[in-house]
Amino acid sequence: EKQWAQEAIEQYGYDNSLVQESARRWRMLTPADKDRIKAEGDAIYRDFAGLVAEDPAGPKVQGVVGRWHAHLGNFCDPGPEVLAGLGRMYADNPDFRATFTAMDPELPELLRDAIDYYVANLP
């Protein structure tokens, strides 16, 4: 967690206060809440992996991006820059990339492209 936080600040331009707020929110959760949030996140990424053959801009993928965005509310209130930064980190960071590639070799690019489309079309 600390390594990710430092990388988020240094490489992706995240505001330190956002990273600190995310860590604070996580520490305040009960173990049961943490388990629920982890399971929800796992389900979201499995759903993404099941859609790698779909158009990143299509309604199925964008529906999952919307769920992912809502899920992030457990950690922070991410603006468009943070969302786009996460998409890039999922594709570019070796650790995230390895995690998502293990699920499906095309998943990191789907995540990046789908999140980019989502951010570009936020109201």
Image: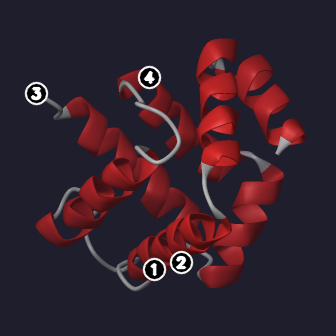
Q: CA distance from mark 4 to mark 2?
A: 26 Å
1 vs 3, front mark: 1
Q: Amino acid at mark 3?
A: Pro
- Disc 2 secondary structure class: helix
Q: Which residue is mark 2?
A: 39
Residue visible at 51% across and 58% down in the picture: 109
Towards the viewer: 69 or 98 = 69
- Classify residue 60 by image quadrant: bottom left
Image location (x, y in percent) of residue 102: 71, 80
Q: In terms of depth relative to the viewer, which is nearer, 6 or 32?
A: 32
Badge number at residue 43? 1
- At label 4, which amino acid type do we have? Glu
Report the Cα–Cα distance between label 4 and label 3: 14 Å
Q: Who comes first in sequence, dot 3 or dot 2?
A: 2
Q: CA distance from mark 3 to mark 2?
A: 29 Å
Q: Amino acid at mark 2?
A: Ala
Q: CA distance from mark 1 to mark 2?
A: 6 Å
- CB-based contact (under 8 Å), mark 1 and mark 3: no
Comes first in the chain, label 1 or label 3: 1
- Label 1: element kind: helix
Is tag 4's residue or tag 3's residue first in the polypeptide sequence? 4
Q: Give residue 81's mark.
A: 4
Q: Is residue 122 visible?
A: yes
Whether label 1 touches label 2, CB < 8 Å: yes
Three-letter code, disc 1: Ala
Q: Quadrant of the C terminus?
A: top left
Q: Position of residue 25 (x, y in %)?
A: 59, 39
SS at mark 3?
Answer: loop
